[in-house]
Image (spheres, rainbow, N blue to C red):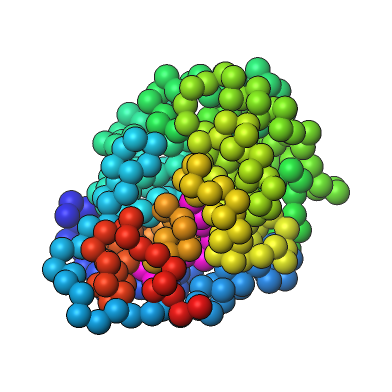
């Protein structure tokens, strides 16, 4: 495996000593400033949802299967017409230059090293065009509806022109939540941080503070007045597949399909929007049932082990995404760290399939869960 920036062997040795995603978290904590770590790691309010995203996975037990030939295990899945070697994607997360000086460039390289698909964030510190230029595999782009529709349309046109494979439209943060830990750490974007994808709108938008001072209720960068009408409009502007991210309510999931969305991503934003939402894995079955196979359902939130990914697949997800874990990898070791995090999870998923007696992801069903 080739390694990111710097003397490869040293980075490789440093990385292989970290065996679990939690090892990466502990290591990242040591290498990041307190402010950057708090931004990365924290959730909202009392972090009930953050904790439950993990606890809910741990409550679900596995049903093993004896004497099944698992000499060949294939984790590949097809999403939006393209084959992925495993059903683990990198969720959209902002501001990667907080975690590595090259920011998203290293993330793209890490995604390529590990063959994972990266969903680039609207609030990236490297533009989608620059990311695409170094990417070996197609990127997806996460969109927040901008306050100005024309800006939203321009942004979509730009990412399409740069080769975006599908859009991930995030709909679960109409207002700001109480990010108390961030506030306690006095988190602010470091001087010079730019949201590179917004630079074409205005330098002020690109450099706006993370949180407005004062009441801090609305974001200057995300429209609070978005409705299903806007989704209808967006659908009419592009033939690109649209995945709607941040769905927990089954009625919303059904509506998303009616409005032409091509996938639903069950997510509580990693416990970063409003507290006491259900764990994403607990919300998944009801959404899967409501969708009834019409479009793929993905999920994220709390995936830290291959067994977690397996449980999501068993409950009907087509793939999972991870957020914080690959950022820990980025902070610890740039591209190599991102790749190692993915590799750990992928290998653990294969192991879980071996113990539960599955050769292919499409065979996985809930009868190998102890429920
Ligand atoms: C530091 C950080 C930044 C994030 N930024 C975004 C974002 O810009 N857009 C978005 O849709 N989700 C964002 N998310 C949420 C992730 O896409 C994802 O839903 C969440 O991290 C999954 O939970 P996990 O961190 O437990 O894996 C962010 C999450 C983190 C941790």
Q: Classify residue 57 as left or right of residue 314.
A: right
Magenta segment, which residues? Answer: 298-309
Q: Position of residue 114 (x, y in %)?
A: 27, 52
Nearest to the observer: residue 194 or residue 139: 139
- Is residue 359 visible to the viewer in this orientation of the structure? yes
Instruction: Reply yes or no: does residue 285 show up in magenta.
Output: no
Against 116, is 193 above or below? above
Quarter of the figure with residue 305: bottom left
Residue at (74% x, 43% y) in the render: 174
Q: Classify residue 364 as left or right of residue 244.
A: left
Q: Position of residue 207 (x, y in %)?
A: 63, 34
- Is residue 15 visible to the viewer in this orientation of the structure? no
Against 311, is 146 above or below? above
Residue at (66% x, 39% y) in the render: 255
Quarter of the figure with residue 16: bottom left
Quarter of the figure with residue 227: top right
Residue at (60% x, 51% y) in the render: 290
Q: Position of residue 284 (x, y in %)?
A: 56, 59
Against 304, is 316 above or below? above
Residue at (41% x, 78% y) in the render: 62
Nearest to the observer: residue 247 or residue 359: 359
Q: Position of residue 333 (x, y in %)?
A: 33, 59
């Amino acid at each position: 495996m080739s390694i990111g920036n710097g003397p490869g062997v040293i980075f490789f040795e440093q990385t292989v000593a970290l065996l679990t995603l939690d090892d990466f978290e502990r290591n990242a904590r040591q290498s990041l400033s307190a402010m950057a770590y708090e931004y990365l790691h924290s959730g909202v309010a009392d972090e009930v949802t953050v904790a439950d995203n993990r606890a809910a996975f741990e409550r679900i037990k596995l049903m093993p299967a004896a004497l099944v030939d698992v000499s060949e295990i294939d984790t590949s899945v097809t999403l939006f017409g393209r084959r992925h070697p495993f059903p683990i994607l990198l969720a959209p997360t902002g501001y990667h230059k907080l975690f590595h000086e090259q920011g998203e460039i290293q993330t793209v390289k890490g995604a390529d090293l590990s063959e994972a698909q990266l969903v680039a964030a609207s609030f990236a510190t490297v533009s989608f065009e620059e990311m695409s230029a170094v990417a070996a595999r197609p990127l997806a782009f996460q969109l927040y509806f901008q306050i100005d529709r024309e800006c939203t349309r321009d942004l979509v046109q730009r990412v399409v022109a740069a080769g975006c494979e599908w859009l991930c439209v995030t709909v679960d943060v109409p207002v700001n939540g109480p990010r108390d830990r961030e506030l306690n750490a006095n988190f602010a974007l470091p001087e010079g941080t730019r949201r590179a994808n917004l630079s074409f709108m205005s330098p002020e938008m690109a450099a706006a503070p993370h949180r407005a001072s004062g009441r801090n209720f609305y974001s200057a960068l995300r429209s609070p007045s978005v409705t299903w009408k806007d989704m209808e409009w967006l659908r009419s502007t592009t033939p690109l597949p649209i995945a709607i991210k941040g769905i927990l309510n089954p009625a919303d999931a059904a509506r998303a399909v009616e409005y032409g969305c091509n996938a639903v991503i069950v997510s509580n934003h990693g416990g970063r929007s409003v507290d006491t939402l259900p764990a994403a894995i607990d919300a998944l079955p009801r959404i899967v049932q409501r969708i009834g196979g019409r479009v793929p359902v993905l999920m994220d939130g709390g995936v830290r082990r291959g067994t977690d990914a397996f449980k999501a697949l068993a409950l009907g997800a087509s793939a999972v995404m991870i957020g914080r874990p690959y950022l820990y990898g980025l902070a610890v070791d740039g591209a190599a760290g991102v790749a190692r995090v993915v590799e750990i999870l992928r290998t653990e998923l294969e192991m879980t399939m071996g113990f539960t007696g599955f050769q292919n992801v499409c065979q996985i069903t809930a009868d190998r869960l102890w429920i």
